[in-house]
Each structure stands twice: as structure tokens, then as C-alpha cells.
Amino acid sequence: YMESTVTNQKHPRGLYVLFFTEMWERFSYYGMRAILLLYLIKSAADGALGLPEDTGGAIYGLYTSSVYLLTLPGGWIADNMLGQKKAILWGGIVIMIGHILLAVPGNNAIFFAGLCTVAIGTGLLKPNISSIVGNLYPEGGARRDAGFSIFYIGINLGSFLGMTVVGYLGEKVGWHYGFGAAAIAMFLGVVAFRLNSKHLAGLGEPPEVKGSPTFLYVVAGALVLMATLVLTGFLDAVELANVMGYVIVGITILYFAYIGLLDKSLSVVEKKRVGVLFIFFIGAALFWSGFEQAGSSLTIFADRHTDRIIGGWEMPASWFQTANAFFILVFSAPIGALWIYLNRKKINPYVPVKFGLGLIQMGFGFFIMYWAAQYAVEGIQVGLGWLVFTYLFHTLGELFLSPVGLSTYTKLAPKKYYSQMMGLWFVAASLGNLIAGLFSGNFSEDNVAEMPALFLQVCLFGVGFGILMILFYKPLKNWMGGIE
Ligand code: GLN
């Protein structure tokens, strides 16, 4: 009875403002991402760029990875300069400008400038809109969790609609119409936010004391350096993506080593928790490196090896990606109810076990692809069900790992590293996206025979690390030092 009164409680009006703003933003993000790799690698005869798969995959990886990495300066700007509300508004405007640039046909320089612009704007909007959702419920607790679940529905509703509309326009009408639709969606999001932000009075205001912008100079310097290396031809996209991967891994290891081994102000319990955070980081990066192949290798497979003819009409390849959003909408409530039920029975699995099960389900999805790819190698166009079932398992995996992962991550963080650890959770997603892009570079037309082995590799990594986490759940749980 208590639980139902809590969840039936009215939510603040502001939640719905954030819901619709995020819905339109995710419409534009996932809509554009659904066709991005196809636009990069399809031939010039199809009106696309005709890049080789490894270059296309590297660009896809660099873009999606940057989106998550740029949430770090985006969160910093809100905390130290603009406040969350202005950061969301400006982020939305920058994203819209980026999609408008993508919609301009026939100029690669403008196209790549558009990609960079969308990434910067998303870094500004995405972390700050989630943090205002949290601020709507200063008391925390079940009502706050319910608020986040409603917000997650907005994310996936937007994602579903965006992939449907932008995917259809992009593949069937013209790529740039798809990108244009993403711009319109973001425009609607910005207008909705601006007109209704009165419902967010007192939230996400600019800080009283502004921070010193040194951190931003470092970020801007790194971006200028990257751009220079590429524009002078010193690095190509694949090399840049590899360098970025090594830099992310290197900085992460140094960061963990510093906190876990060298910071003398932390207690032994806190240091053990940092060790667990490191293991979770590896698990999360691995999970996303498989999961985020939705827009890369799995869409290549949908395009080339899946029979998409329904009643004489060919379905857009990008539409398969909607399965993830659809299954989230269907399964997030039942899985949430399952945790509550198991909790009441006192048999709710420990966090490392849930994490491991999430990885195993992701890996199992790739086992289905390993199977499907064996038919594809024979030249058979496989049925729609293979990819749909793969996405079903990937989505269940996401529901096991992602919500639990983020909340545990922040709970395990030593107090003074709280926001940095939240940032690190995004760094894991960033690394995963980068690997997902680089890996799909192997899926070229003359490498078709390798496809089953490639999918099997992802399966084994996911299942293997998942099993390890379950086998070692006891020490992991002990090292969590009482945090559930
Ligand atoms: N699909 C979710 C979103 O876009 C989560 C993605 C992630 O954390 N990698 O917000």
C-alpha cells in the first residue's frame, strides 16, 4: 500500500517539461544516428559518401564517443558558469544548428562541422537535463526513482519516433531530409523548453560564484589539437579513433590508480570501493562496446543480409534499431516490478550479479548474430527475427546493467569524487561507443566470411566477463563495504 501511494503521487509539472524536451532531443540524436553509418558508407550512387567501412566505423565511433565524453565539460559549464537551465537551452540550440548543417547537401566539410556541432551541443544538454530531473525531488526516495522512470520513457519514446521518421526519410526520400527532420525535432524541443521553463523556477540557476575556466581551456586545446592533426592529414579517422581509445584508457587507469592507491585521505573501505568501481568500469565499457553496435555492425547486417521485404515493400534498414526503444518501453516496468518483488522476498540479486547477467544477455544477443551470420555467409538473406531477438536480449541486458550501474556507481564513489565518478560512468559509455565503431570497421563487403567469427568474439567477451563477475560476486560484494 505504501509503495502504491508513493508512485501514484503527482509529479511536479517541471518533470513533463523535461520529458518533452528530452523526447525531442533523443528524437534528433537517435534518428540521426540510425542513418549515420549508412550515409557514411553507402555509395555515391545512393547519394551517400561512399567511404570504406573502416573509415565510416571510425567516424561513427568518434562521433558517438565524443558525445559522451563532452558531457564532462558540459556538466562543468552548467555547474560553474551557466546553471543547468541555460546549458539545456543553449545545448538544444547548438544541436539544432548542427543538424541544420548536416541537412545541407553536397559539402563534406559542412557535414563534418555539423557532426562536431551536434556532439558539443549534446554534451551541454544531456547531463544537465538528467541532473535537473534529480533536483526536482530533493527528498530522493521512491518518488524520485519513479520520476526517472517516467523520464526514461520520454527518452525511448523520442528514440523510437526519431529512428522511425528520420530512418524513413533518410533511406527512402533523401539523406538530408532525414537530417533536416532531426533539426526540426530539436527546434520543437527548444521551443517547448523555452515556453515552459517557468515550471522550473528556482532550479538549475547559474552558480553564485563562477569557476575559473582553466578546465575549459584544456578541453578546447585538446579539440583544436585533434582537429589540426586531422586537417593537416597527419592522422586519418581510423588512426585518430585508435589514439583516442588509448588516451581514454590511459587516463582512466591513471585516474583510478591515483584515487585507489595514492590518495592518502581515503580510508581502506573507500579504496576497496574504488577497486570495485574499476571492475564496473571495465564491465560497462565492454557492455556498451557490444550494445552500441546497434547503429554500426548490426545496421550493416540489416542493410546487407536481412530480408526486409514486407508485402512487396522494402523496410528501411535503420528501422531495426527501433526494437531497442520498443522493448525498453515494454519491459522497463515489469523489470522494475521484478526488482521490487525480489526485494520483498529478500532474494534481489547483488549488484555484481545483475551486472554480470546484463553482460551475459548482451553476449547472448551476439550469439544469435553468430548463428544468423553463418546463413548470411552462404549468401542467404535472413529473416527479420534474428535481429529482433538480438535486440530483445540487448535491451534486457541494458535494463539489468544500466540503471543499477549508474546509481551504484554514484553510491560507491568517495564523497569528494562524487561528480567525477558520475562523469566516469559516461567515460565508460564513451569508450564503449568508440570500440563499437572501430570494431564494425571489420564488416566490409570482402570480409563477409569473417562475420560469424567477429560476432562470436563479442559474444565471448560479454559472456566471459559476465561469468567472471558472477563467480567473484562475493569478494566484489565485500569490497563494496555494505553498499547495496
Ligand atoms: N538510451 C539511453 C539514453 O540515451 C542510455 C544510453 C547510455 O547510457 N549509453 O539516455
Image (spheres, rainbow, N blue to C red):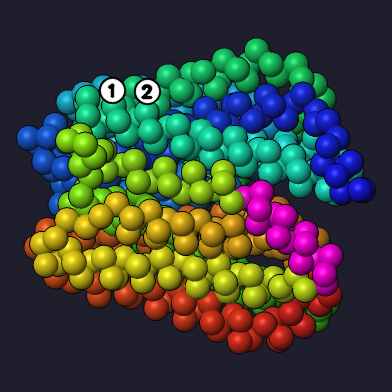
What's the residue at 53%, 62% (across, down)? Answer: 397
Does residue 346 appear in the picture of this structure? yes
Say above or below: 375 vs 298: below
Mark 2: amino acid: Ala
Mark 1: amino acid: Tyr
Magenta residues, start to end: 332-346
What's the residue at 25%, 75% (across, down)? Answer: 453
Q: Position of residue 359 (x, y in %)?
A: 51, 70
Q: Do the residues labelled 1 and 2 touch (CB within 8 Å)?
A: yes
Q: Position of residue 135 (x, y in %)?
A: 79, 38
SS state under label 1 = helix
Task: Determine the residue located farthest toward the front in the rendered image.
Answer: 311
Q: Position of residue 263 (x, y in %)?
A: 73, 73
What's the residue at 63%, 20% (across, down)? Answer: 193
Task: Determine the residue located farthest toward the right in the rendered image.
Answer: 2
Residue 445 numbered mark, or none:
none
Q: Is residue 471 left or right of residue 362?
A: right
Q: Is most of the magenta stretch helix, strand or loop?
A: helix
What's the residue at 72%, 30% (across, down)? Answer: 15
Task: Determine the residue located farthest toward the top in the rendered image.
Answer: 195
Residue 177 numbered mark, or none:
1
Specify the quadrant of the image occupied by residue 17: top right
SS state under label 2 = helix
Residue 343 part of the magenta-drawn span: yes
Q: Is residue 476 left or right of residue 252?
A: right
Say above or below: 296 vs 455: above
Question: In this view of the protein, which residue sits in the foreground, 163 or 245?
Answer: 163
Specify the quadrant of the image occupied by residue 201: top right
Does residue 300 appear in the picture of this structure? no
Q: Mark 2 points at which residue?
A: 181
Q: Position of residue 261 (x, y in %)?
A: 68, 79
> Are there few (<14), some (14-19), or many (20+) residues within 10 Å of tag 2?
many
